[in-house]
Image (cartoon, grey):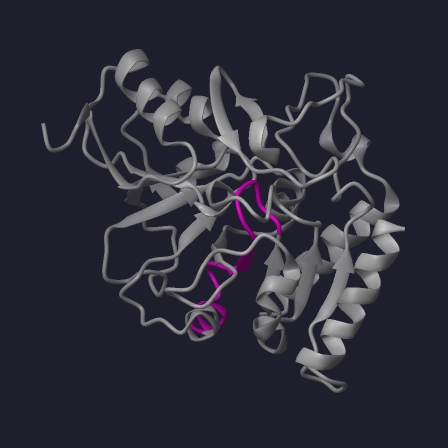
């Protein structure tokens, strides 16, 4: 019943916000349960306090958002259980539809482990310009890139921290700012030598990133200076400018300001130091890992 009601609300919103015609974004609902795939170990997940999900990324315990009623939370891929084996046909079709729209130069709204985002291909300069236009911002505010796995990060960034540190924080609700490599599109954030990297702890986003030939550019699904969004209806004003909207259900408790904080953004571009650019939803555990496990010091120290 809840899924049927959600589909009806989406249909009505699409008619009202966009109207019939070629400007309408296509809506794709992930499989029931917010699109979550079966845990390969058959384990049950329990919601953390406040309606958000608490999960692990390697040894790090990072608080992140998940969908109400069993939505996407943190998943760990275990040896011998390839991600593809967990997917149903509906899931694969959603990934293929989103990848196709991105490769055609479109903008796609996506659920992440924190808030809803909008993605495009980072190596597609025209798409990058479109995402800036959608956000209503100029090119002076950088876009993050999104990858499916830590291994791919080394192609687009110059890394000066241990690989174990990366894996303690990624995938997870953290954006790591590193020095960009020459492989990254020069039209993406051309004013800076740095780039933020996201690997969301969300199975759909990781599958989508793996299905694309290069990194995704990723930003929150809202106009700049407006609040983050936890449901697709909250950003329906943007639908006319999108090729596809992937609805993974509500992300976390829509009444909780904490669930709208977005990722913690930390600059690791200076060896031995870190700088918090945005506190986000995982500040305390991130700082604890950086200080206690790896001995990094705040850049202001």
In this view, 225 is above or below 263: below
- Res. 171 in view: no
Name which quarter of the figure residue 97 lies in.
Answer: bottom right
Q: Does the magenta stretch include residue 182?
A: no
Q: In this view, does 264 lie to the left or right of 274?
A: right
Give residue 288's position: percent from left, percent from top: 32, 19
Residue located at (67% from left, 57% from top): 99
Residue located at (62% from left, 43% from top): 210
Residue located at (62% from left, 72% from top): 239
Give residue 180's position: percent from left, percent from top: 31, 46
Name the one closer to the observer, 224 or 77: 224
In this view, 112 is above or below 191: above
What's the magenta region? 111-129
Q: Is residue 115 magenta?
A: yes
Q: In this view, does 126 lie to the left or right of 53?
A: left
Give residue 9's position: percent from left, percent from top: 78, 65
Q: In this view, does 244 lie to the left or right of 291?
A: right
Q: In this view, does 150 lie to the left or right of 82?
A: left
Residue located at (66% from left, 24% from top): 77
Q: In which quarter of the image is the C terminus?
A: top left
Name the one closer to the observer, 192 or 172: 172
Name which quarter of the figure residue 28 lies in.
Answer: bottom right
In this view, 247 is above or below 135: above
Give residue 256's position: percent from left, percent from top: 52, 44
């Amino acid at each position: 019943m809840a899924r049927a009601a959600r589909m009806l609300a989406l249909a009505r919103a699409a008619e009202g916000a966009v109207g019939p015609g070629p400007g309408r974004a296509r809506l794709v609902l992930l499989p029931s349960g917010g699109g979550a795939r079966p845990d390969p170990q058959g384990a049950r997940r329990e919601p953390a306090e406040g309606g958000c999900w608490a999960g692990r990324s390697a040894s790090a315990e990072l608080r992140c958002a998940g969908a109400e009623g069993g939505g996407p939370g943190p998943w760990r891929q275990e040896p011998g259980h390839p991600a593809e084996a967990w997917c149903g046909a509906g899931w694969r079709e959603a990934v293929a539809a989103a990848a196709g729209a991105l490769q055609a130069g479109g903008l796609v709204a996506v659920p992440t482990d924190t808030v809803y985002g909008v993605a495009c291909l980072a190596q597609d300069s025209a798409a990058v310009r479109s995402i800036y236009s959608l956000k209503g911002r100029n090119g002076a505010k950088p876009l993050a890139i999104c990858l499916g796995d830590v291994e791919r990060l080394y192609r687009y960034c110059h890394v000066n921290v241990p690989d174990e540190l990366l894996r303690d924080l990624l995938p997870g609700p953290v954006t790591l700012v590193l020095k960009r490599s020459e492989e990254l599109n020069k039209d993406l954030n051309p004013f800076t030598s740095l780039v933020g990297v996201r690997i969301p702890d969300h199975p759909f986003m990781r599958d989508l990133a793996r299905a694309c030939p290069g990194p995704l550019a990723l930003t929150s699904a809202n106009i700049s200076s407006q609040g983050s969004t936890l449901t697709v209806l909250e950003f329906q004003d943007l639908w006319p400018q999108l090729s596809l909207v992937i609805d993974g259900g509500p992300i976390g408790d829509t009444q909780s300001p904490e669930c709208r904080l977005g990722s913690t953004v930390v600059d690791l571009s200076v060896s031995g130091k870190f700088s918090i650019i945005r506190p986000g939803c995982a500040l305390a555990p991130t700082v604890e890992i950086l200080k206690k496990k790896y001995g990094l010091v705040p850049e202001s120290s």
